[in-house]
Image (cartoon, coloured by chain):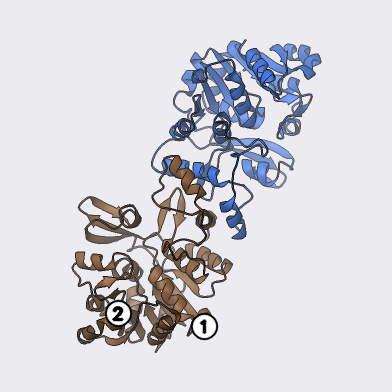
Chain colours: A blue, B brown
Amino acid sequence: VIVVLSGGVGAARLLRALRRVHDPAEVTAIVNVGDDLELHGLTICPDLDTITYTLAGLNNEELGWGLRGESWRVMDELAALGGAAWFRLGDRDLATHLFRTQRLREGATKAQVTAELAEHHGVTERLVPVTNDPLATRFGTDEGELSFQEYFVARHHDVVVRSLSLRGASTARPAPGVLESIATARRIVIAPSNPLISIEPILAVPGVREAVIARRGDVVAVSPIIAGAALKGPADRLLHELGHEASCVGVARCYQELAGTLVIDQRDERRAPEVRDCGLDVRVTTTIMADPDDARRLAQEVLA
Amino acid sequence: VIVVLSGGVGAARLLRALRRVHDPAEVTAIVNVGDDLELHGLTICPDLDTITYTLAGLNNEELGWGLRGESWRVMDELAALGGAAWFRLGDRDLATHLFRTQRLREGATKAQVTAELAEHHGVTERLVPVTNDPLATRFGTDEGELSFQEYFVARHHDVVVRSLSLRGASTARPAPGVLESIATARRIVIAPSNPLISIEPILAVPGVREAVIARRGDVVAVSPIIAGAALKGPADRLLHELGHEASCVGVARCYQELAGTLVIDQRDERRAPEVRDCGLDVRVTTTIMADPDDARRLAQEVLA
């Protein structure tokens, strides 16, 4: 089994790429829940949903989130009511959140609901939230503390972040199977997700970081930073604001104790020696997954 | 000010009729919340919404509930997911529930949210839930206790009811203004709603029954039973199952201590003496509100 520590979009694309070279039934994604939110009484899990929708072939490529062919009747009406419409939820997407929330109210765990949704959508990879317990990434800013989606969506990540914290991390327990799958995986992949707000919340659940460190030789990370910039989202900016170098070398330093190998983009090839100086092996390839061949090549490098 | 103790559809129609003879800004509806429910994490208030939508001219006449021109994208998708789709919530209607639930989470009361929704829809009547506190009508049956909507919607009220109970009634507090408006109203109208499951939950909130009894001479009830049958819903059946006569006389006995006058349909004219024997004055008119003239006539009788 291949374990993939996963944020949202970048991880979803890597998981899709892995299908080209590996049986998806033998892939387990351990997914960040630090950006999950409660809104309108609904429990929303953006990273889990992004992965499920992407692997089901239902993701909206233009928007970069949500479902393709989506409609917005509920949101349009909610906006007309003067409701909280800043976090756009499409009509079909809302069904996911209604389903999840009702099942949670009935006593199901987030992991169980995730499995039910994956099965419904024909996703054969095993998708597991890192924890069934509450976990929330918080952004310290000069305007006070913001929730993940306040920072990310409402403020379009256009505010300087002074610190990050994870509410609930000290008491969260790994979801069933998380530690076991890390301990027994043939390979553990850290997806090209934001190290600070996608991967760190996974590692912060007690026991997970230690489990990954114990497997360091089999851990391969993919740098989400290419030529100093994030493909999507504020990873570069956040790294810089929080005192890291916004580069594959900065990523290498973040993952120094966790990963034996870092996959970097060919545009960063000249920085390979610095990554090696951090104590990581380096693999150089095209990491953007712009076409099927690139995706296959990256997947092969990751599993090599 | 005219106060109307209100269930859902029948009360909404009476409130609409009252507009023909009275300034709606001088009408306060005190509305049942015993059939409110939590589903998918959303707080749903069927009677409040039926009244708001009807007075806004947005109600779906064919369905008898919900909004006209409604679409069902969320529900269709939820059903496909295997979710709890037995309680049909249209897309636009869902926006109401998302709005309410979010506002409640932000600390607003049910009464505040009701006022916000009414204002948005241009409803000038004052709509007040009888209480901001939890209150739930429960149905004792041979299959165990059912919630209101389990009985009404999931089971299509096709199960014998042995008893009714009201969870939360002993500790619920009247919403701000409820007791005051009853104490000072020029007239108090008991709408043609189900006496047992629409009006009784209003009266059961501590203080309300006593406040109505104190105004008995100014209280006019409209019988929801015409020629032994309810226009809509299971009122006749429930009255019978719970040991009442399913007739305007049975209704008179329910309201004996509360109302000075009962308005009955002309088809029940022959039973007027029996209603008088219960100690109520009787007014006889057409109570069905089938056309604007009938509606005006009923409204005039109620305010006479």
Q: Position of residue B300 (x, y in %)?
A: 41, 87
Q: Position of residue A105 (x, y in %)?
A: 41, 44
Mark 1 to mark 2: distance in Å? 25 Å
Q: Report the residue at 41% width, 47% height from top.
A: B85
Q: Which residue is mark 1?
A: B23
Does A278 sit above or below residue A49? above
Q: Position of residue B181 (x, y in %)?
A: 44, 78
Judging depth in this view, the residue of B128 and A142 nearest the camera is B128
Judging depth in this view, the residue of A146 and B157 nearest the camera is B157
Secondary structure found at label 2: loop
Does A42 sit above or below residue B182? above
Q: How many marks?
A: 2
Q: Report the residue at 38% width, 80% height from top.
A: B189
Does A266 sit above or below residue A151? above
Q: Report the residue at 63% width, 17% height from top.
A: A299
Mark 2 is on which residue type? Leu
Residue reaching furthest right? A270
Q: Position of residue A232 (x, y in %)?
A: 71, 32
Secondary structure found at label 1: loop
Which chain's residue wears label 2? Answer: B
Judging depth in this view, the residue of B70 and B108 nearest the camera is B70
| Quadrant of the rendering where the C terminus of chain B is positioned | bottom left
Could you say which quadrant of the image residue B204 lies in?
Answer: bottom left
Judging depth in this view, the residue of A89 and A108 nearest the camera is A89
Residue reaching furthest bottom? B304
Which chain's residue wears label 1? Answer: B
Are labels 1 and 2 assigned to the same chain? yes
Q: Which residue is mark 2?
A: B258
* Residue A277 visible, this orientation: yes
